[in-house]
Amino acid sequence: MSDIKDFRDLIIWQKGMKIAKECYFLTKQFPKDELYGMVQQIRRAATSIRSHISEGYGRRSSGDYKRFLNIAQGSINELQTHLLLAKSVGLCSQKDIASLIEELQSETRMIIALIRKLE
């Protein structure tokens, strides 16, 4: 982690930013009556991933960092659930969410690896 000067240098944070942006673009297609429902839930969960990664990094304690990484992982699971529900009720297609689900699975692997490294 010697090349890491701040949280923006973390690949997992960068991936979290990419996921959040993709979720914002995806939810722009949703009907307006979902603005305070599924749109808000998806955007909040997506934003939470990168926010907890950066917040944990800023705590400067490996115990706190691991705790926030675990919270970010919870947000990944929540986001996958919202995306799968959105697909199942016809707000988007499998094609719309396939790459996002892959990114979330990759992010999970990276978070687990980082948690192990911090132990």
Image (cartoon, rainbow, N blue to C red):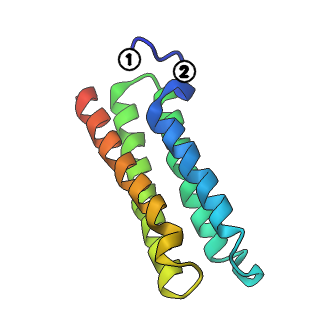
Foreground residue among 26 and 35: 26
Which structural element holds mark 2? loop
Q: Residues within 10 Å of mark 2 (few under 14, many from 20)?
A: few
Three-letter residue code for mark 2: Asp
Q: Position of residue 119 (x, y in %)?
A: 22, 29
Image quarter of residue 63: top left
Q: Position of residue 69 (x, y in %)?
A: 39, 41
Foreground residue among 11 and 115: 11
Label number found at residue 6: 2
Image quarter of residue 118: top left
Q: Label 1: which residue?
A: 1
In this rendering, is residue 46 above or below 18? below
Residue lying furthest top: 2
**From the viewer's perspective, is 30 left or right of 2?**
right
Q: Position of residue 12 (x, y in %)?
A: 44, 37
**Marks 1 and 2 in Cβ contact (< 8 Å):** no
